[in-house]
Image (cartoon, rainbow, N blue to C red):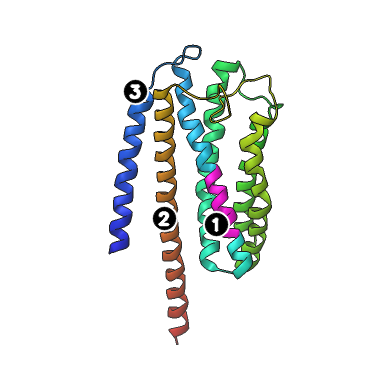
Amino acid sequence: MKKNTSLTAHGVITVVWILISLYLIFIFAPNELNQGNVYRIIYIHVSSAWSAFLGYFVVFIGSVGYIWRRSQAADDLAYAAAEIGFLFCSCVLITGPLWAKPIWGIWWAWGDWRLTLTLVLWLLFVAYLLLRSFFVNPGQAALLSAVVGIIGFADVPVDYMAIRWWRTQHPQPVIMGGPNSGLPPRMEITLFVTAGAFVCLFFYLLRQRLALGRAQRELQQLGRELAAAEP
């Protein structure tokens, strides 16, 4: 009962936080002088990217826990985070081109390191999830996907630092990138409140997915017990 109450409260907080974020994005935050209203996509884009990075970090932690101790709980955590991280990373790849087309004049720039590395991160999520469904043996699937979860994490810090390390002909917004990379106060407030809402949503979805996984395992166990009890 306490878990259900906690999860419900978490859901209510998430919804309220997202509504506040939408108000800040579309009403509170001022227009950007050069980009106009199009720049508002960035609040969703950047928040999704940070949540995708968080997702793969949780995948990494869960994968390390599984390989180290063969912990079912750690494997469940990594698997759930991979599914949710995939959703956020997909949102990054959708909102990025929606911003790039009116600003750059093109949907995608293949020579841009940040874009390429984000696509690699998305493919790592795909590879992790495909491994979970490809192998019949759950232990083998968990082990191989954990290897992907650990090795693939190297892409996350490199992706984050890409636009700081490599110059590109297509300028991208840099947050906390050093001198002259900050935002006006109202834009900064909007970004961090929205990022917080996305993180809150990430953990709410993670809790829901873990609860669903436990329910599925209990149902399978009940099915095996019923099968064994049949004459």
Nearest the eye: 213 or 31: 31
Marks 2, 3: nearer the viewer: 3
- Callout 1 secondary element: helix
Q: Residue at x 42, y 16 (%)?
A: 31
Q: Quadrant of the C terminus?
A: bottom left
Q: Which residues are magenta?
A: 53-63
| Residue 225 picture location, percent across and down | 44, 80
Q: Earlier in the sequence, mark 1 or mark 2?
A: 1
The disc placed on residue 28 is 3
Q: Earlier in the sequence, mark 3 or mark 1?
A: 3
The disc placed on residue 99 is none
Q: Earlier in the sequence, mark 2 or mark 3?
A: 3
The kind of residue tagged 3 is Phe
**Residue at the disc numbered 2:** 207
The kind of residue tagged 1 is Ala
Marks 2 and 3, Cα distance to the nearest angstrom?
31 Å
